[in-house]
């Protein structure tokens, strides 16, 4: 029995998610399907990247993760199968949505093989006609490399590292600011956002209630928070805000 997870911005009001599940179950009977979330804000690739990065590596090896947050559907971006390592396989558009969950993929393949698609392919519903059948093919035993030609992923969220500036890519429901920074924490004393310097801490308990802190979040990137409060409100910051790591001299 194979596990397939689904992450989309489809919501549950319409039949889009059910259509994807129907394709998977028709082509790979017995597959277990787990919903990560279908409440990603419309076309918010960064939020989807954060959601799947939070969940994917909690699943057993062999799990297939389908992510469909795809503002470029019908455009030039490729549909891909990605070997993320540790037994986790990802299926979706090459638009940066796997940048956090699979920052150093072992391989990626464009979805072109007939077994991996449902024809005719709608120009606007690749979730049903490309990504769901690709997941079903994998669940039925197909190798990722048989999806099509090997490719290098080109989709980016805009990352940064070291002492280079990054940006806030997601604001979670607690008001925490999630950045794209995967900085080396050795010698890091904090981050600058706007005119504010936020001190470095290991976790919330290291600061007093109401205190600001920067730390490595569960997705492996630097986050900014207020203990028992909202960093987004305190700093009047949101998606796109520039964040610079500060290293002690």
Image (cartoon, helix red, strand yellow):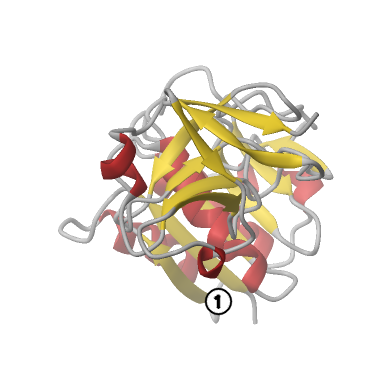
Q: Quadrant of the N terminus?
A: bottom right
Quadrant housing residue 87: bottom right
Q: Position of residue 206 (x, y in %)?
A: 56, 65
Secondary element under disc 1, as helix, strand or loop, is: loop
Front position in the image: 120 or 98: 98
Q: Nearer the viewer, residue 207 or 36?
A: 207
Above or below — where is 74 with respect to 80? Answer: above
Q: In which quadrant is the C terminus drawn?
A: top right
Q: On the rendered structure, is 47 left or right of 158?
A: left
Residue 67 makes an appearance in the image: no
- The location of residue 221, given as percent across then percent down, is 62, 46
**Residue bearing the label numbered 1:** 31
What's the residue at 66%, 52% (across, down)? 220
Q: Is residue 225 above or below residue 160?
A: below
Q: Is residue 24 left or right of residue 115?
A: left
Residue 98: x and y in percent read 60, 43
Viewer-nearest residue: 244 or 40: 244
Q: Residue at the top extreme?
A: 76
Label 1: few (<14), some or many (≥20) within 10 Å?
Answer: some
Give the x, y percent position of residue 153. Answer: 70, 29
Q: Is residue 32 above or below residue 64?
A: below
Q: Residue at x 66, y 65 (%)?
A: 57
Q: Nearer the viewer, residue 29 or 107?
A: 107
Determine whether, in the image, residue 65 is placed left or right of residue 170.
Answer: right
Q: Residue at x 64, y 60 (%)?
A: 202
Could you tell whether 144 is left or right of 167 in the image?
right
Q: How many marks?
A: 1
Q: Is residue 193 visible?
A: yes
Q: Residue at x 42, y 55 (%)?
A: 211
């Amino acid at each position: 029995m194979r596990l397939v997870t689904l992450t989309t911005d489809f919501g549950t009001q319409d039949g889009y998610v059910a259509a994807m599940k129907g394709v998977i179950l028709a082509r790979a009977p017995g597959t277990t399907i787990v919903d990560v979330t279908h409440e990603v804000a419309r076309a918010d690739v960064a939020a989807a990247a954060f959601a799947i990065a939070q969940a994917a590596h909690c699943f057993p090896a062999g799990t297939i993760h389908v992510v469909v947050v795809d503002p470029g559907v019908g455009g030039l971006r490729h549909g891909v199968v990605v070997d993320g390592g540790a037994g986790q396989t990802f299926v979706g558009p090459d638009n940066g949505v796997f940048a956090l969950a699979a920052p150093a993929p072992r391989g990626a393949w464009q979805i072109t093989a007939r077994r991996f698609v449902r024809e005719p392919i709608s120009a606007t519903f690749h979730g049903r006609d490309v990504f769901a059948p690709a997941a079903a093919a994998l669940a039925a035993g197909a190798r990722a490399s048989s999806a099509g030609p090997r490719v290098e992923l080109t989709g980016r969220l805009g990352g940064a590292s070291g002492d280079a500036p990054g940006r806030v890519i997601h604001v979670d429901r607690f008001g925490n600011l999630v950045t794209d920074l995967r900085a080396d924490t050795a010698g890091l004393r904090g981050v600058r956002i706007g005119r504010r310097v936020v001190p470095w801490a290991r976790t919330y308990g290291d600061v007093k209630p109401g205190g600001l802190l920067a730390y490595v979040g569960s997705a492996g990137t630097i986050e900014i928070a207020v203990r028992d409060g909202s960093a987004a409100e305190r700093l009047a910051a949101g998606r796109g805000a520039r964040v610079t790591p500060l290293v002690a001299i």
